[in-house]
Image: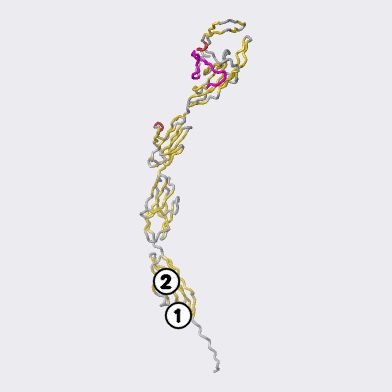
Amino acid sequence: MANTFFSKKIIISAAIILGGLFIAADVLVSANFSAVKLSAVPDSPQWTQETRAGVSVPACLSSSASSPTCVGETARATISWTNSNSNHAVNLDVCKNYWCDSIVYTPSGMYNSAGWDWFTLPASGSVTLDPLDSNTTYIYALRDGSSVISNRSFITPNCAPANYTLSVNSSGASSVAITGSPSTYGGTTNYTKTVTDGTSLSLTAPATKGSADFSSWSGCNSVSGSGNRTCNVTMTANKTVTAGYISIPGSFNLSQGSIACNSVGLTWTASSGADAYRILRGSARVDISPYQPYIALNFTDTTVSQNTSYLYQIEAYNSAGTRRSNSLNVDTPSCPPTLNFSANPTSIFQGQSSILKWDSTYTTSCNASSNPTQSDWNGPKALNNSVGQTVIPSPPPSVTYTLTCTGPGGSIPKSVVITISPLALPEFREIIPR
């Protein structure tokens, strides 16, 4: 018990002395028990008066303390007791760290009228001790009137708020100036802050860093703001958040590949950081990419015409932006003409006919000739004739038909030979002898 309690003068009607029995009425006893150490007995649910000189008191009081809990940054515990001796009131003292030099806790409103440091409780009941120091050993002592002190102990949890580490990083760019709300949480990445458990804060990244643009945050509870540049964090554990930046694609070069009258080949070097490419054509930079995303480093344009100038440029892109290659002017050459020319049939009897058919490409004119000269064939012709022209070749033994077609890319002649067999004279037989 505390000094203030044990230094009181108490009038008792009897006293028991070790080694013999001394009985006196109305004896004034002055007691001074200082710095009494109470030994914890956490495993015993009830206690008895200490037995001496052949005198004992049976067990009559049991108690327990609930598991201490935290309420905010302080601790709380509830002590319950049951006293089988209904004639005695129960007194409770609470001390900490096992030495009761002074009583450190008395429940509010439970002091007695004399201001003593113990108080009278109902024979059975409970009392909540709140607030208590966190991470502290407490002992509590109950008495049922005349019995000596007995006690038990409990340890309160650590209720102080935890501190956590917040790490703020950036990727895709060098150190980035981060604005914090509260401002103490800002800084230049990469940095760390010690933050109290439960603290809510916001970190805002700039839209650009050099040639890099803000991309996204990671590690946040949520993101918000002009482009999700604000990272909202509630500290319930150690956390790492990263402001991601991405640079626009790097420089690259466009070159001419294989060129034909009807196709243009393009090739280019890789652009660092590019997600894909667009093939642009003409002064309006029309996108002629065959599909998106186009990730190859070459392309053949087969939608061109012969003898025509074209302007090309490649555009590399990613989420941060775009970068274009150098421009490239390409002149397609003229296509060499093609000609298909045929006769059907190619072998006839004199006086019979044949059909001549032809088709040409990349031509602007066609002209016919024959050997020997055939009046029904010679002269200008259409560029194509799928129906055919009927001719009667003459004379035997053959006629060579020639068709020459001309275009920007040159001229091409084709010839067919039709063989002609003469008609046979009938055989005559004398029927009248000479």
Determine the CA span between mark 2 and mark 1: 20 Å
Kind of element beneath mark 2 = strand
Query: Is 205 within the magenta?
Result: no
Disc 2 to disc 1: CB gap under 8 Å: no
The residue depicted at 41 percent of the width and 47 percent of the height is: 317
Which one is in front, 28 or 186?
A: 28
Q: Position of residue 383 (x, y in %)?
A: 41, 69
Which one is in front, 315 or 241?
A: 241
In this view, 409 is above or below 187: below
Q: Position of residue 301 (x, y in %)?
A: 42, 56
Residue 395's tag is 1
Q: Does residue 374 appear to the left or right of 20 in the view shown?
A: left
Q: Which residues are magenta?
A: 107-127
Quarter occupied by residue 148 = top right
For residue 37, say whether it is visible. Answer: yes
Q: Position of residue 193 (x, y in %)?
A: 43, 31
- Identify residue for label 2: 403
Query: Is 124 within the magenta?
Result: yes
Amino acid at the residue labelled 2:
Leu
Considering the image in quadrants, where does the C terminus appear?
A: bottom right
Say which label, 2 or 1, has the lower sequence index: 1
Q: Tag 1: Cα neighbours inside 10 Å, few (<14), some, or many (≥20)?
A: some
In this view, 68 is above or below 306: above
Which one is in front, 88 or 303?
A: 88
In this view, 181 is above or below 15: below
